[in-house]
Image: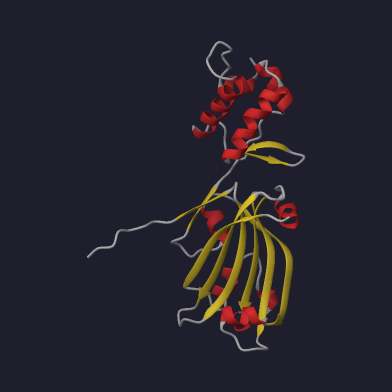
Amino acid sequence: MPAFAELIGSLDPQARGPLYQQLQQQIRVAIQNRVLAPDEALPPERDMAEEFAVSRITVRKALDGLVAEGLLLRRQGAGTFVASRVEKSFSKLSSFSEDMISRGRTPRSEWLQRTEAAVTPEESMVLGLSPGSTVYRFHRIRFADDLPMALEYSTLAGYALPSLQAVGSSLYEALEAAGNRPTRALQRLRAVLFTPEQAALLRVHPGDAGLLIERRGFLKDGRPVEFTQSYYRGDAYDFVAELNALTS
C-alpha cells in the first residue's frame, strides 16, 4: 500500500459515517500524534483519491474541514500543508525574532518601508512627542522558516535610535544596543479580516481571519518609545496568557 495510507491508516468502507469524515479523522489524529509533522506537505488530492479509492470530492471535503479547524493550510501554487502554529505569550515582552529562535524556527524579515519623518498627530499622542519631533517607521513582513507569519508596522521615537541604519534584523536588538529597549508594554488584541493587499503579502485569501496586536512599549522611566501594530495570520498563531487568582 502506498506510503501515505500506511502512515495514517486505510479507510473502512463498511464503517458507519461518510468516508470523508473517516479520512478527516485519521489525518487529524496523525497530526495530533505528530505522525504528520508541522509544515509537512500532504500528497496531491488526485493521488490521495487514487490511494484511498475515493473521489476527489471526498478528499477535498475532508481537507476543507481540517483547513477550517486550522490544522491544515493551503499555500497557493504549492499544495496543502500541516499547519505550524506558534504560541505567543502575553506575559513576556519579547521580539518576534526571539520568539521564533526559542522555538527552533529561523526568523527573517522583508522590508516594506524604512523611513525617518516628522511625527503625525496620532503618533504624537501615542508616543507623547512634541509636534515636529522625529520618528522612525519600520514596515515589514515577518517570516518563520520562509513562511510569512505577520505584517508589522512599528513607529519608534527618534531619540531611541542613533539613526535609521542602526536597525538590522531586530528592532529590539537595536533598541537594546542604544540603551532604549522597552521594559514593559501595553498590548491590545482584536480579530480582523485581511484586506486583499494584506492577504497577498501573507499568502492567504482576502477576508481570511487574522489577529491585530497593538503594542505600546515603555522605557524604565515611563516614557513611551514604541508603537507597533502587528497583523498575525489566524491559522498560524495562538496567543496565551497565564492568569493567577487574586489573594486576599
| 84 or 162: nearer the viewer | 84
Asked if residue 71 shows in the view, the reply is no
Quarter of the rendering occupied by the C terminus: bottom left
Relative to residue 180, is residue 58 drawn left or right?
A: right
Asked if 231 appears above or below 28 in the picture, the reply is below
Residue 246 picture quarter? bottom left
**Among the 4 quarters of the image, the one containing residue 120:** bottom right
Residue that lies at the very extreme toward the left in this rendered image: 248
Q: Position of residue 90 (x, y in %)?
A: 47, 60
Q: Could you say where residue 31 lies in the image, as x and y percent from the top left?
A: 54, 33
Residue at screen point 25% across, 63% down: 247
Residue sitting at x 61%, y 23%: 20
Task: In this rendered view, identify the residue nearer to me: 140 or 119.
Answer: 119
Measured from the top left, where is residue 131 in percent x and y? 65, 88
Instruction: Determine the residue located farthest toward the top in the rendered image.
Output: 14
Q: Is residue 56 visible?
A: yes
**In this picture, is 22 found above or below 31?**
above
Q: Place residue 49 in its image quadrant.
A: top right
